Amino acid sequence: MKPDNKRTGASVAMRQVVKAFGENVVLNKLDLDVDPGEVVVIIGPSGSGKTTILRVIMTLERIDEGTIEIDGRHLYHEQKNGVLTPASEKHIRSVRSDISMVFQHFNLFPHMSARENVMLAPMKVKGMTEDEADVQAQELLNKVGLGDKLDHRPSELSGGQKQRVAIARSLAMEPKVMLFDEVTSALDPELVGEVLTVLRELAASGEMTMMMVTHEMGFASEMADRVLMFDRGQILEQGPPDKLFKDPDHERTKTFLRAVLSH
Amino acid sequence: MTRWDWDYAWEITPGLIQGMLTTILATLLGITVAVILGLFLAIGRRSDRKWISYPLAWIIEFIRSTPLLIQLFFLFYALPLITFIPEPIRFLSPLTALVVGLGVHYACYCSEAYRAGINSVDKGQWEASTSLNLKMTTTWRSVILPQAIPRALPPLGNYFVGMFKDAPQGSAITVAGVLFVARALQSADFRTVEPYTIAGILFLIVSIPAAIFVRSLERRTFYET
Ligand SMILES: Nc1ncnc2c1ncn2[C@@H]1O[C@H](COP(=O)(O)OP(=O)(O)OP(=O)(O)O)[C@@H](O)[C@H]1O
Ligand SMILES: [Mg+2]
């Protein structure tokens, strides 16, 4: 990357977003603005809709109402003659190129080596040559500390290593917004640290907007610009980690934090 | 009781081998049609577009629930009567009709094997593909099928052996396969034991190696997620 062209990530603007599964309204007229380069941590009780927020931004679930803008571009809508109409798949794909998601269960491609996992999308989507993609994959895998595992299949890697490959695979697409859904929850405790180290580096670089759902409160208070306490499909309260963790306004937040920290 | 006549047996063997080669040819061409068409049927059945997926599901079910023999009769005897169909499709040669019949019939079974393989691929693979903004065709070609096809290979192998055993039904539409030759010898020379015994031996010679090949497909290891 050219230093004069330093990336800062994209903004995310959600307006009155509704997402329901049948009767179950999971996102209830949600409004949320995230600044370019901001690191936002989302916490909240199980089933409150944390994963769903990330999934509707990643277009893994389609919203029922409202709008989402990435860097000022509508994700699910297109302006046609000044009217907001549902977007074509092509439009969604074009906006989606700014976004990438890392999953709790890695979802690596099991039939490919670490290197091939990282090379696939840049070659197929960005039209990189095999050599370019290979150089980039090696750089990224080095960066996440896996320079010696280039040709290992996922089945030959530990959970922490798999998750770092998954992060490198997302980074290869140079997303402006990265979404992390409990990316350390499926790991053995002794492997959590190595993944958090990588995330810390990404957050500190300020090169991208990061939205993460996590129960790692230590990490959140250290790295987050803002913490969102989510409850029943809405933001219950939000603020800088110092405020939210030490002096929350809502009783529910206190109860939740006590429950999480006590275990 | 007639005795086994070695001279006669040697005399008819080349003709029976010739018939067997035709049967093998029909099977190889038929399985090629079946595995390719079956894959497209399986992918089409998963389409979000209901006007594609619904009719396909119905056609597959229909073909699977009618006997192959009736489908062969239809292709060879009934099709030529349907006058609005263009000539080259209407009048199929016996071998072409057999290959099409076997291919389409088994494609419907193969599509079920693929479907099971595709469904066994973790949902997270689709989601990771979306998160990397892969095109649908790339997702199928580079992510889903490389995992689904190995899992579909054992049943596909069984259909291959099954098709080989069904291919002699082509004799009903005058394909000069091994069974057709045996039957012709029987009515010409009034001998039954030699033609059918040799035909049976020829089947064994081909199907035993084929079965071993199929078993080896089943032992293939799968990718671990
Ligand atoms: N595909 C789906 N179909 C039906 N209901 C769903 C689906 N996905 C999520 N839900 C429901 O939506 C609600 C919110 O789910 P979500 O996964 O967003 O919660 P969460 O806050 O991430 O919880 P957790 O902390 O347990 O991961 C839950 O009640 C869940 O059952
Ligand atoms: Mg969740």
Image (cartoon, coloured by chain):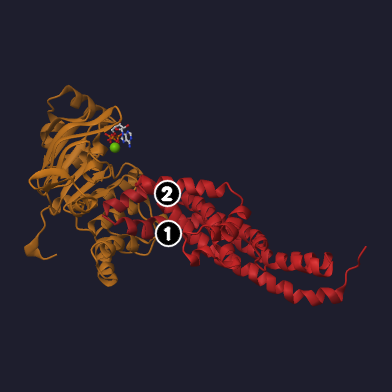
Pointers 2 and 1 within a single chain: yes
Looking at marks 2 and 1 on the same chain, the residue that comes earlier in the sequence is marked by 2
| Mark 1 surroundings: few (<14), some (14-19) or many (≥20) residues within 10 A | some
The foreground one among A47 and B149 is B149
- Where on the picture, by quarter, is residue A20? top left
**Badge 2 residue CB within 8 Å of ligand 1:** no
Host chain of mark 2: B
Residue A185: x, y in percent? Answer: 32, 41
In this rendering, the answer to whether B182 lies above or below A105 is below
Chain B tint as drawn:
red
**What residue do we see at 31% from left, 62% from top?**
A120
Label 1 sits on a secondary structure element that is helix
In this rendering, the answer to whether A219 lies above or below B136 is above
Amino acid type, label 1: Pro
Chain A tint as drawn:
orange
Quadrant into which the C terminus of chain A falls = top left
Amino acid type, label 2: Arg
In this rendering, the answer to whether A233 lies above or below A95 is above
Q: Which residue is mark 1?
A: B146
- Where on the picture, by quarter, is residue B24? bottom right
- Say left or right for B220 vs A116: right
Q: Which residue is mark 2?
A: B45
Q: Quadrant of ligand 1?
A: top left
Host chain of mark 1: B
Label 2 sits on a secondary structure element that is helix
Quadrant into which the N terminus of chain A falls = bottom left
